[in-house]
Image (tube, coloured by chain):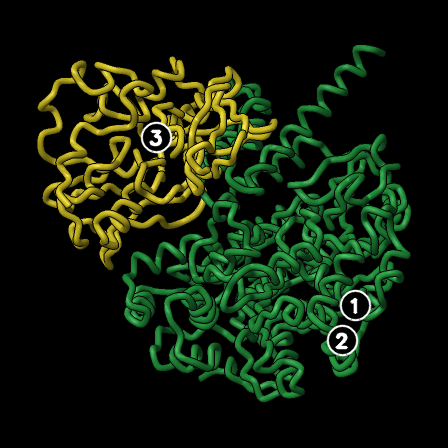
Amino acid sequence: MTDTLQFFIDQQAVPFQPGQTLMQAAQAAGLYIPHLCFHDGLTPHGSCRVCIVEINGSIRAACTTPATANLQVHSETSALRTQRRQLIELLFAEGNHLCPSCEVSGNCQLQALAYDLGMTHYEFVPLDPHRQNDGSHPDLFIEQDRCIFCELCTRSAQQQDHKNVFGIGGRGADTYLFAQADSSRLADTAITAQDHAAHICPVGCILPKQGSYQIPIGQRVYDEQPIHLRGNHRPDEQDATP
Amino acid sequence: MTSSSTASASGLPRLFSRSAPLPQWDAAAAQALLQARFGRLWQRQDLLQALIVIQHHFGAITAPAQTWLARHCQSNTADVRALIHFYHFLQEERSTPHQILFSSNIIEEQQGMRTLFDELRMGTHGLAEVGLTSCIGLSDQGPAALVNGHPLTRLSGQRIREIQRQLQQQIPLAQWPQNWFRVDDNIQTAGRLLQFQPDPALFLSQLLAQAPQQVIDRVQQSGLRGLGGAGFPTGRKWQACAEAPGADRYVICNADEGEPGTFKDRVLLQHNLDAVLCGMRMCGHAVSARHGILYLRGEYLFLFDAINTRLQQWREQQWLNADFNIEIQLGAGAYVCGEETALLESIEGRRGIPRIKPPFPVRNGLFQLPTVVNNVETFAAAAWLLQSGVDAFRAVGTEQSPGTRLHSVAGDCEKPGIYELPMGASVQDLLQACAARNPALVQLGGPSGVMSSPADWQQPLAFEGISPGGSVMVFDASRAHFNIARNFTAFFQQESCGFCTPCRAGTQVLLRDMDCAAQGQQHADLNALATLINSTSHCGLGQTAGRPVLHWLQMNAAKKTEVAHD
């Protein structure tokens, strides 16, 4: 009977398997719910909150809410779109996200969502962080001020590469991404440029040192197609070789 | 070794006495301290507890200490630092033997804490680290501060100058006058719970004979609800845990009483500890758990040795044994760890980041095993009702909220302290009892609760009325609502765990833009931002972090409407 299980997103029926979250089922059905910290195949996280949906008047993250039969889920309402945009605006305010001077402009999922959700300007005055960058690794660079604490890299290294590479330290406004080594330097971890974790950052925080500008800005992934059609994909994700 | 290892009457080492920090890192001394703390080989999951011991005895967790700890638990020092940086009471460096942290709750701020703070900081340059910390649970006898983790109460200008002299003359903390550290119970109205002093031998011999399901049934029939704030039916929680599959189970007493303005659990732990332990013991019996943990907030470090000694006496009497044992774990300055799943993370030795729910702790709790987490007062009330019976329990309070409730009252009143009243008593009853002075606003349930004004004060303090959150802060007509809202917002900003976007980034922007608004500068839409934080955050902390601003805006709007109608 499990093949008949379904719930509804904006009146559209979505089939699901027991144990799936709303996001996993929606993704399998080809329905896009905006998100940053979700990645199919990694444990759900629920930190970015961009995938908020409304169920019986309360707001939940689609990526951490288990699907249940006949649930009525609202996603593309104007109130939710506004709140998603505000969350994106908060992430812009919190980090160093100056698109015109960023090497991932056009490939960046934060920027793509900003366009999709109608962000036209800085709603919040930037908080202007100054964290220590890490250029120690021969192939990868960490621009710490762009971290959005989605922990995709942390989870990807653990669950796909089976390595202990990244971690999150500190608290609140002083939360930071770190490399799991006495030196806190990425060069002293086991990560390589071929690891999944090297190709999963949705923003311009963990950057490859080679080939950044091979494809010019204006001809990149999200310059060609909006994120709700393209999905959350990096152009180089297939470069990861397990 | 120093006096830190002085044996107490029970023969247990006193782990957290007022001794001076050791002058430099000493691995052998650390080894001995951790042996005294754990009494067994410790591992990565004990790292937070190890850090707390090292912090207390060395004043900081310096680089060589980090390396030593990291090697011991097969980790790296960046991982150790990540943990240190989460907990406010852990630090990597200490410039002076003494660190004094003033409680920054609004009550203390209104009692002139800032002036004392500035005076001490300027007068002790280089002699002590002086800082601020979130409410330390002493608002009824403030202004208060922690010196090397020990509370200094009833601070005044005179006392600050005396402290400066102690520091200048380099008098060791252990020799500071004892009465400076006096913590009073301030029990103003003692009801049946505060008067409850069970004889554990008698209590346990009578009640452990009951079948576990019978115990659960009685707790269910009593209608007892969790007194930590959320009000979940206690019997249902125990039943769910008992039914959950698992090779083992845990019972956790949440003594991380962090809501600013609350201090009733401190009084229960000092005054009615056996009642709390009896409640935990019975819960262990009811759900077939073998392990109990009392998670004590770092601010109550001064209670650690007394509780530990009492636990040792319980073991000697076989009231705790192989069937069920209780140990203490300490927090280290993180309000969010009062959230039950963050508390589990903290006990497992990690940063206190709330977990995704479901699964709930009754199914997947500590180390993924079924776990009951209840507050201090809940366990004491459970013990009372099991001894006195369901009918006696329900004879007081309301139909939906039976029993009594402990209120911690502080602020503009003649008699701050603890009031145990029947559930359903009104705010007005409480204000009369504490002799409130010209009250205009009353914050109920701490910053995450509600700001009430006279129109609300006939409502019952009960789960069906104004949620009885334990903390009652009274403000007279001279107190500016903006200052209260700003203090609470700053509290949430400082205590956000940093996990989710709205709480981490949103509280920073909200606090900054409140100040901009007050100064007539450009600012974000505070209403929209506070609403966003409340509605989209991951856990209960974030979901209430916008409330102080919303209450302030609502009352402002109401005032303007009133003026317009006049």
Q: Which chain: green?
A: B
In the foreground, B562 or B411:
B562
User: What secondary structure is found at the residue carrying circle 1?
Assistant: helix
Residue displayed at 77% across by 64% down:
B185
Label 3, label 2: how far apart the Cα atoms are: 54 Å
Q: Position of residue B108 (x, y in %)?
A: 68, 49
Q: CA distance from mark 2 to mark 1?
A: 8 Å
Q: Amino acid at mark 2?
A: Leu
**Residue named by callout 1:** B386
Output the chain of dot 2.
B
| Circle on res. A28 | 3
Q: CA distance from mark 3 to mark 1?
A: 52 Å
Q: Which chain is yellow?
A: A
Q: Residues within 10 Å of mark 3 (few under 14, many from 20)?
A: some
Residue plotted at (79% across, 57% down): B221
- Circle 2 — which element? helix
* Residue assigned mark 2: B207
| Callout 1 amino acid | Leu
Tell me which numbered mark, 2 or 1, is placed earlier along the sequence: 2
